[in-house]
Image (spheres, rainbow, N blue to C red):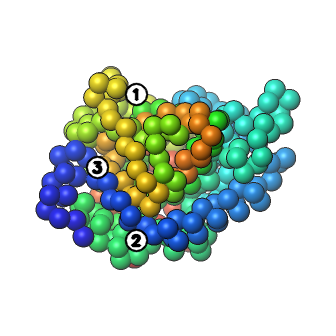
Amino acid sequence: MLTADQKRCFEDEGYIILPDFKSASEISTLKTRANAIAAAHDFTANKEVFSTDRQRGPQEDRVQDYFLKSANEIKCFFEEKAFDADGNLVQPLEQSINKIGHAMHDLDPVFSKFSHGDKLAELAADVGLNQTQIWQSMYIFKQPRIGGQVDWHQDTGFFYTTPQSVTTFWFAIDDATLENGCIWVEPGGHKSPLRQRFIRDGRQTKLLDLDNMPWPDKSSAIPVEVKAGTLICFNGMLPHYSAPNTSDKARHAYTLHVTDAACEYALENWIQRSKDFPVRGFV
Ligand code: FE2
């Protein structure tokens, strides 16, 4: 699928941009399904918020349990700014959800169809993944006006393997622009050290600092503005970030985090699978 030049680009820069990887109809089918899941969310019972800041410290037991269960289920998380001081939604429910995670790719037929197939397997092989294992799916809404920032991070820290193999498949469901919070990357930054690891110990999770190398800033990072249907595929070591969405336009995206079964998947990673729910690949 990839040309020799594209493969070299992935190796040198740590990412590749593939416009029109998904058709308009595939995109709209996924978006419709995601909106339906969000609209059906029982927000009176579950008001759990997701923000990258909150992953740093201890959370309430109830919130932590909800987060841990989401590893192998389908759960909705709210934007940090979804509620007013009285706990009421400031926007309609469908415009308040931050993300859906983290196992739709295996549990929901519409998401499963989008997340599997020969085309993805072929691309994965071209970027060095031969025996794929899809550990996580996330549908990120980046809602108009309240869509939260995602701090600089490297996905390897969440899906640690020896040797490193995690690769991220980031699908633009809407056009992603500077205005609505497109992703920023540091070209070549995948050659820098792993700064942090997110680990699980029983019911506790924590972010461990490994290396004090500073995160990129606007002098070395670039925004990746892409059209809906584009796939950005990147090395798990590539530092990336996205700004808050202060515009009136949503910036939906869908991501898959994939490793190679030939590499050892760490037991401390927060997502684990059991024999009755085994991890699967693209085919
Ligand atoms: Fe990420």
Q: Secondary structure at mark 1?
A: strand
Q: Which residue is mark 1?
A: 209
> Where is mark 2, residue-wise?
282
Mark closest to the chain's N terminus, 1 or 3: 3
Kind of residue at badge 2: Phe
Q: Tell me if 266 is positioned left or right of 205 in this view.
A: left
Q: Residue at x 35, y 73 (%)?
A: 119
Give the Cα separation between the discs numbered 3 and 2.
Answer: 19 Å
Residue denoted by label 3 = 15
Q: Nearer the viewer, mark 2 or mark 1?
A: 2
Q: How many angstroms separate mark 1 from mark 3 (CA)?
A: 24 Å
Can I make out residue 56 in this image?
A: yes
Q: Position of residue 172 (x, y in %)?
A: 46, 55
The type of residue carrying mark 1 is Asp
Residue 257: image location, x then y, percent: 42, 55
The quadrant the N terminus occupies is bottom left
